[in-house]
Image (cartoon, grey):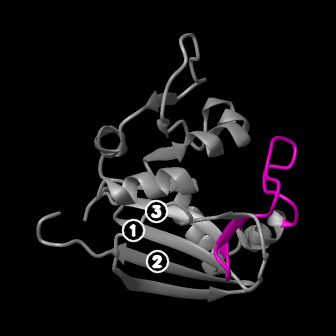
């Protein structure tokens, strides 16, 4: 696949991507910052540095609305001026996102626009809501899970509202580094999905 739509997400062993009470001013929830300690090595020549450079080589970003808002809308630029497609249920009149961001209300349309904008580069996905919507629509190709050896016990889970459909994943890469295991999965497609 030339330009996969790939989720990038740090997650605790018990499935949390943020601690409890994630909100503006406490965007990662209580103790949620623990999930991002591996980013201390993002400038290294090690495996976390490799994964971080791969993420920043993506050609477009799809974000859920909640993630976009908690991130301060990234001031309109996630990285290198790539387009940001914010998957949302609705758009309020007069709410114009900054910079390179735009709102999209349909998961398939969002995926189509992001792939076209990314050219031959992968598309980065941020946020549980966006990941779940793209999975349900058959548009999420891969997941890069940064699995952190901690049990947060509470907070926001990555796959809480996915539904009851069975989804198979193929592990295509495993990279161990200090305080994290980077796991890349390909979403297994049925023949009907293509």
Q: Is residue 156 left or right of residue 77?
A: right
The structure residue drawn at horizontal position 47% and vertical position 45%, both measured from the top left corner, is 62
Q: Nearer the viewer, mark 3 or mark 2?
A: 3
Do labels 1 and 3 touch, CB within 8 Å? no
- For the point 50% across and 87% down, the residue is 174
Tags 2 and 1 in contact by the CB under 8 Å rule? yes
Choose top left, top right, bottom left or bottom right for residue 25. Answer: top right
Above or below, comparing residue 96 to residue 155 in the picture: above
**Magenta segment range?**
11-31
Occupied quadrant, residue 72: top right
Looking at the rendered structure, the secondary structure element under dot 2 is: strand
Q: Which residue is mark 3?
A: 162
State which tag comes first along the sequence, 2 or 1.
Answer: 1
Residue at 75% of width from left, 70% of height from top?
35
Give the residue number, with chain letter if any, for mark 1.
Answer: 142
Q: Residue furthest left?
A: 192
| Count of number-bearing discs | 3
Image mark for residue 1: none
Q: Earlier in the sequence, mark 3 or mark 2?
A: 3
First reached walking from the N terminus: tag 1 or tag 3: 1
Q: Is residue 34 left or right of residue 4?
A: right
Q: Position of residue 162 (x, y in %)?
A: 46, 62
Q: Secondary structure at mark 3?
A: loop
The CA distance from mark 2 to mark 1 is 7 Å
Relative image position of residue 104 (x, y in whole percent): 42, 32
Task: Give the residue displayed 41% in from the left and 33% down from the top.
Answer: 105
**Numbered disc 1: secondary structure:** strand
CA gap, disc 1 and disc 3: 16 Å
Distance (Cα) linking label 3 and label 2: 19 Å
Can residue 122 be seen from the camera position used here?
no
């Amino acid at each position: 696949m030339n330009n996969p739509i790939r989720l990038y997400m740090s997650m605790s062993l018990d499935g949390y991507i943020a601690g409890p009470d994630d909100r503006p001013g406490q965007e990662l929830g209580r103790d949620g910052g623990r999930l991002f300690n591996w980013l201390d090595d993002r400038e290294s020549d090690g495996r976390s540095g490799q994964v971080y450079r791969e993420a920043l080589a993506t050609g477009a970003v799809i974000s859920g609305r909640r993630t976009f808002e908690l991130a301060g809308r990234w001031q309109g630029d996630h990285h290198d001026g790539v387009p940001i497609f914010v998957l949302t249920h609705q758009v309020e009149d007069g709410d114009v996102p900054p910079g390179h961001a735009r709102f999209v209300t349909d998961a398939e349309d969002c995926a189509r626009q992001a792939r076209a904008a990314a050219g031959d580069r992968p598309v980065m996905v941020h946020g549980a809501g966006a990941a779940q919507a793209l999975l349900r629509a058959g548009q999420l190709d891969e997941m890069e899970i940064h699995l952190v050896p901690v049990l947060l016990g509470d907070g926001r889970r990555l796959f809480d509202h996915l539904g009851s459909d069975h989804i198979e994943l193929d592990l295509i890469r495993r990279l161990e580094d200090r305080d994290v295991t980077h796991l890349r999965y390909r979403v297994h497609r049925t023949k009907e999905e293509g």
